[in-house]
Amino acid sequence: MNSERFEPLSSASPEFWMEQLKEGKEEALAHLMTRFERPVFSFLHKKLRGEIGVVQELTQEVFLKCLQNCHRFESGRPVAAWLFTLAANTATDHLRKRGRELQTPETFDLPDPIQVSPWDQIDQHRKLDSLRASLEELTHRQRAMVVAYYINERPIRNIAEDFGCAEGTVKATLFQSLVKLRKSLGYSHEPQT
């Protein structure tokens, strides 16, 4: 029997598989992927804060770089350290590239669903001005109850306690106030059927 080291292929070290890869045996990459694909994926997932699809692509890119640059791997160095350096560089390149990318021209014309158009802003200002003017037409007590209930969202029970009156009085006052506001704003006070 010769004195060469013999180890079952399934338990061979990553360094053994890297040497095989450097010798041109591309099937060695599958063994390295079996050992390191999950840890590299987890590392990239944490570094990029999610983005599963992107992380999967970048994980594959790391092993492609491993295959393309295996001749640069220095024997005696831990394979894990080299692979994680490749992963860190891949993530950094991705973040740098994403930071430089501009929106495609088609997206410039799309309205921002959150931003209000200037015309809508003018319309909103007019409506608010009308509402303020209508609120001024209410009595002090009506205005205070409307603000307490509809703006400050205070329960009717609490408003009744604040004004020292019955809950029914608060409800009646709110109803009368709304009828008055609807008329003032030009809405019919009759419910639509």
Image (tube, grey):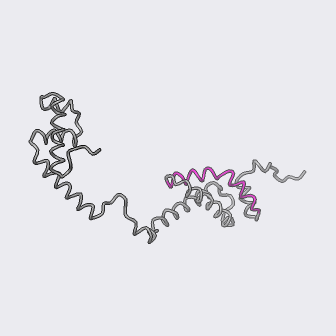
Is 47 included in the stretch rendered in magenta? yes
Q: Is residue 192 above or below residue 118?
A: above
Q: Is residue 76 above or below residue 192?
A: below
In the rendered view, does 21 fall on the left or right side of 123?
right
Question: How many numbered badges does the structure rendering display?
Answer: 0
Q: Which of 122 and 188 lies nearest the eye of the viewer?
A: 188
In the rendered view, does 168 fall on the left or right side of 75?
left
Please provide percent x and percent y for residue 70: 68, 64
Please provide percent x and percent y for residue 183: 16, 48
Is 153 included in the stretch rendered in magenta? no
Q: Residue at x 73, y 60 (%)?
A: 19
Q: Residue furthest right?
A: 1
Q: Quadrant of residue 139?
A: top left
Please provide percent x and percent y for residue 73: 66, 63
In the rendered view, does 3 fall on the left or right side of 88?
right
Q: Residue furthest bottom?
A: 105
Q: Quadrant of residue 69?
A: bottom right
Please provide percent x and percent y for residue 181: 16, 46
Q: Is residue 69 above or below residue 176?
A: below
Q: Residue at x 62, y 50 (%)?
A: 38
Please identify the dominant SS of the magenta region.
helix
Q: Residue at x 17, y 43 (%)?
A: 179
Q: Which residues are magenta?
A: 25-48
Q: Which of 157 and 35 lies nearest the eye of the viewer?
A: 157
